[in-house]
Amino acid sequence: MSEPASEPRDSTLDLNPKFDADGLITAVATDAATGELLMLAHMNADALAKTLESGEAWFWSRSRQRLWKKGESSGNVLRVVEARIDCDQDALWLKVDAAGPACHTGERSCFFRRVENGKLVRG
Amino acid sequence: MSEPASEPRDSTLDLNPKFDADGLITAVATDAATGELLMLAHMNADALAKTLESGEAWFWSRSRQRLWKKGESSGNVLRVVEARIDCDQDALWLKVDAAGPACHTGERSCFFRRVENGKLVRG
């Protein structure tokens, strides 16, 4: 992205992501049709650039320490319908069309359990 | 938040949050009525416990290094309608009723700008 903007991140119209000490921002993907939160992951500058250029979601895997395209093996890519950034530009919201389950467990969403009385309940 | 569960985090029905090296999980709040993503912040174990006990969102401020209740000064509390946790239990999704703007800028959502062609657009 270009030179760092001199305007504060929360009012500028320049994209000026605030990467953390590990070079990452947080990205959440919601289903563009239903609003369901599908997954939360992280992006480095490369993943963000690839996502915005290609229109499909790329992330940085902290466990594997590598760039990955969501769905690269499963085919369950996330097509970006809209990308939004938060006030301090350290979080990205992708509204997506999901080609299949977003979760590695096979669930449509990673958030397939709700918290109730200190326990988890499916569905 | 009993003993660590022996079952894998992605299949257990025990709440067993996976806090990072700083003792935090990520929490996102969406409007329970509209599905709009309102904000993303972090919780330590105390903030998570207070949120689940009180039914209002508490977070850990990384910049101020202290616990804070969302709306403690503005009055714009987030009442939790439902809490969900993701597969590896390092991210929490709160569906909330927001008493007012969730963003410190006065916007309803922190994600008030979309990314288009490398620039930001309001609305």
Image: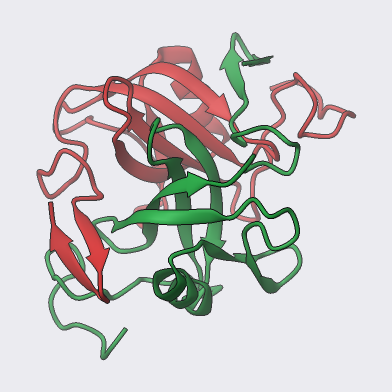
Chain colours: A red, B green
Which residue is located at x 25 percent, y 50 percent? Answer: A111
**A92 vs A119: above or below:** above
Give the farthest residue toward the top.
B117
Query: From the image, which quarter does the C terminus of chain B lie in?
Result: top right
Q: Position of residue B86 (x, y in %)?
A: 28, 55
Front residue of this view, candidates A48 and B12 = B12
Across and down, in percent, residue A7 comes to 88, 29
Q: Residue at x 16, y 33 (%)?
A: A73
Q: Residue at x 41, y 14 (%)?
A: A54
Horizontal relation, residue B66 to residue B99: left or right: right
Q: Position of residue B98 (x, y in %)?
A: 53, 45
| Residue most extreme to the right | A6
**Image coordinates for residue B25, horizontal then vertical, percent:** 46, 64
Q: Is residue B71 left or right of residue A31?
A: right
Q: Image quadrant of residue B30? A: top left
In the picture, residue B4 is in which quadrant?
bottom left
Q: Is residue B36 above or below residue B117?
A: below
Quarter of the rendering occupied by the N terminus of chain B: bottom left
Seen from the viewer's position, the closer of residues B35 and B113 is B35
Q: Residue at x 56, y 40 (%)?
A: A91
Q: Nearer the viewer, residue A119 or B79?
A: B79
